[in-house]
Image (spheres, grey):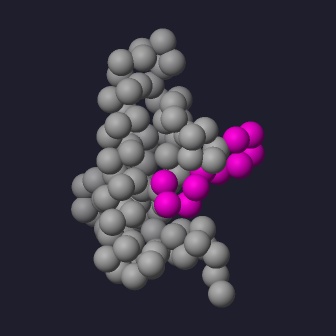
Amino acid sequence: MRTLEERVMADARSPDNSCIRCGSTGTTCGRHYNGPRQHLYGKGRGIKGHPVVVADFCKECDALFQEGCVPKAEFEKRLIYSEEFQHYCILSLMRRIWKGVIQ
């Protein structure tokens, strides 16, 4: 039986899966949350966060949420970025529950 991480990432890469942000299909992949609260979700040195804290993004939307895209000095902007990324993680999680990937 596949692990939760394997099921989540396989679902994220599925050809019929769409980007949770823009709706495009064909290039989606699962991206672990990487905002200022990532350590609260299990992230550590060389360890990815919990597999349910993953958003399904296409290449274009993924580029908007790359780690380091908002300078640490811009705290308020980082919080907005973090909240938006978490929102897409929750929407992706809800979709996986509806599809039966996560029970």
Residue 21 x %, y %: 28, 53
Residue drawn at point x = 31 percent, y = 58 percent? 91
Q: Main secondary structure of the magenta part?
A: loop
Going by the image, does 74 lie left or right of 36? left
Tell me where residue 84 appears, x and y as whole percent. Answer: 32, 40
Question: Is residue 4 part of the magenta span, yes or no?
Answer: no
Residue lying farthest to the right in this orientation: 46
Looking at the rendering, the stretch of residues picked out in magenta corresponds to: 44-53
Residue 58 visible in the shown view? no
Rendered position, 70 above or below 65? above
What residue is at 47 percent from the left and 56 percent from the top? 54
Quarter assignment of residue 103: bottom left
Left or right: 98 as drawn, with respect to 62: left
Residue lying at 74% horizontally and 40% vertically, measured from the top left: 45
Residue 98 appears in the rendering: yes
Front residue of 10/100: it is: 100
| Residue 22 figure quarter | bottom left
Q: Which quadrant of the structure image shows residue 14?
A: bottom left
* The magenta stretch spans residue 47: yes
Q: Position of residue 61 (x, y in %)?
A: 36, 48
Name the outermost residue toward the top.
73
Position of 70 with respect to 20 (left or right) is: right
Q: Residue at x 60, y 38 (%)?
A: 39
